[in-house]
Every structure is written in C-alpha cells, then in structure tokens.
Amino acid sequence: MPNDRFDAIDRRILEQLQRAGRMTNLELAEKVGVSPTPCLRRVRQLESDGVIKGYVAQLDRERAGLGLTVFIAVRLTSHSDSAIKAFRRAVSGLAEVTACYATSGEHDFLLHVLMPDLAEYRRFVLDRLTKLPEVRDINSSFVIDTVKEDAPIPLDHLK
C-alpha cells in the first residue's frame, strides 16, 4: 500500500495495534476515534493489503529459557545464485535463528540467534551452523544487555 493511501485514522489504527494487538475492535475504535464498523473495515483492508502481517504474542526470552542472544555475521564462500539460495534455504530451517538479513559490507548475512546458554551456542555453531552450505566464516557478537527491542515500527513518515 503506497504511503499516500494511509490517512490519519489508518496510522492511529496501526500505532494502537502495535501496542496491543489483542484489543477488541470496540476498544480500538474508541482509541482511534471512529465507530466500530468502519474501524473493522479499515483493519481488514490493512490486513488484506499485507500492511498488517499477523498477530503474535511477545514472549520474555529469559523466562522462556533463552537467556543468550547472539548476532552472527556470516560470510559465504561464493556469491553465486546457487550458493546464496542454498544458504538461505538451510538457514530458514534453523529454529534458533529468529531473523536473517542479507547485508552489504564485509559479511553476507547477519543472523539473530537465541540460545539457552553458551554450551548450547557452541553446539549450534560447531554441529550445525558451520556445516551449512557455502559458509566460509562466522563472527559472533554476544548481547550483554538489551536496551530496546520489539519496538513498534515508526509511522511518522505517513503524516
């Protein structure tokens, strides 16, 4: 959906749903200042257009037993289409990898990985990650403190 198709109401709907996706349509309508029927119609349109991709529960990583967060920069042996496709396919099957970004610069991909502990990380790297197709080398950075995460995406550019 192009930016010019968003109006102030759409923006308020998106902002509110990013804060509390489980609110009822009635609560949402009240917060954005429209009646429930047009509010629901707009939400369904935003979903249909793919602006709203889905609804999820945000879990506390530590309480879920995943106290170690690691960013792993990966460099491939080759930049051929087949090498990149093979790596993408393989990394997509790793549950520990919560996000994978193709990047420019020194490394080819940046992985966001959640682990219970350092021992499990070591097993993951040695037994799985380094055995993925086309992996040349990896460089890991361990998170020592989380300053900000799971923030709503900024929508100020839609004004």
Image (cartoon, grey):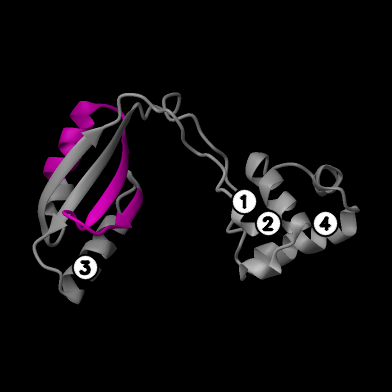
Find the distance from the CA under tag 2 to the CA under tag 1.
Answer: 6 Å
Left or right of 129 on screen, residue 147:
right
Left or right of 22 on screen, residue 87:
left
- Residue 20: x and y in percent read 68, 40
Q: Secondary structure at mark 4?
A: helix
Left or right of 153 on screen, residue 62:
left
- In contact (CB < 8 Å): disc 1 and disc 3: no
Mark 4: which amino acid? Cys
Q: Secondary structure at mark 2?
A: loop
Q: Secondary structure at mark 3?
A: helix
**4 or 1: mark nearer the eye:** 1
- Residue 10: x and y in percent read 73, 58
- In contact (CB < 8 Å): disc 3 and disc 2: no
Q: Residue at x 28, y 64 (%)?
A: 89
Find the distance from the CA under tag 3 to the CA under tag 4.
Answer: 43 Å
Disc 2 or 4, which lies upstream in sequence? 4
- In this rendering, the answer to whether 125 lies above or below 8 is above
Q: What is the count of numbered marks?
A: 4
Task: Check disc 4 and report the residue beneath it.
Answer: 39
